[in-house]
Image (tube, rainbow, N blue to C red):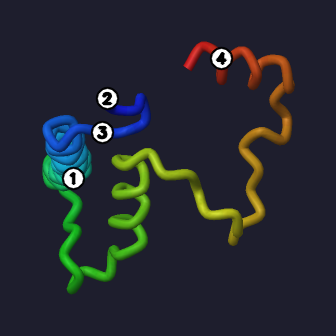
Amino acid sequence: MRSSTSVTPEAERKRSLLERWGVRQLAYLYFDSLRAVREMAAAAGLSLDPETEQEELAVVLARAALELPSPPHNALAVDPHREASKLTLLVAGLLY
């Protein structure tokens, strides 16, 4: 009799297959987001080639596409939430 904690080889194979599929899906979503940013930049007339010295713009667009948080260091010391009510920010965050 098998214990409830043992995993059959078939179940292990299925789990492994699902994990690999999940990684592929995530990679595709990241790639597709970056491709969309490149297309939008081209439609706006922006060049994201390394020779054009617009590296910062490319980084900002990539971070937005991947929905990564902004870096903690704020070089310009601009706080977009300085005059916003905390309640308004909370409601907006919950609605998002």
Which corner quadrant of the image does residue 5 belong to?
top left
The answer to whether the residue labelled 2 contacts the one labelled 3, judged by CB atoms less than 8 Å apart, is no
Local SS, label 4: helix
Which corner quadrant of the image does residue 13 belong to?
top left
Image point 33% across, 74% down: which residue?
Answer: 54
Which amino acid is tagged 4? Leu
Which corner quadrant of the image does residue 9 belong to?
top left
Q: Circle 2 sits on which residue?
A: 1
Whichever of callouts 2 and 3 sits on the residue coming sooner in the sequence is 2
Mark 2 → mark 3, Cα distance in angstroms: 13 Å
Whichever of callouts 2 and 1 sits on the residue coming sooner in the sequence is 2
Mark 2 → mark 4, Cα distance in angstroms: 50 Å
Local SS, label 2: loop
Whichever of callouts 3 and 1 sits on the residue coming sooner in the sequence is 3
Local SS, label 3: loop
Residue 80: x and y in percent read 72, 43
Q: Circle 4 sits on which residue?
A: 94
The answer to whether the residue labelled 3 contacts the one labelled 4, judged by CB atoms less than 8 Å apart, is no
84 relative to 50, above or below: above
Q: Which of the two discs, 2 and 1, sits closer to the camera?
A: 2
User: Dot 3: few (<14), some (14–19), or many (≥20) neighbours within 10 Å?
Assistant: few
Q: Circle 3 sits on which residue?
A: 7
Q: Circle 1 sits on which residue?
A: 27
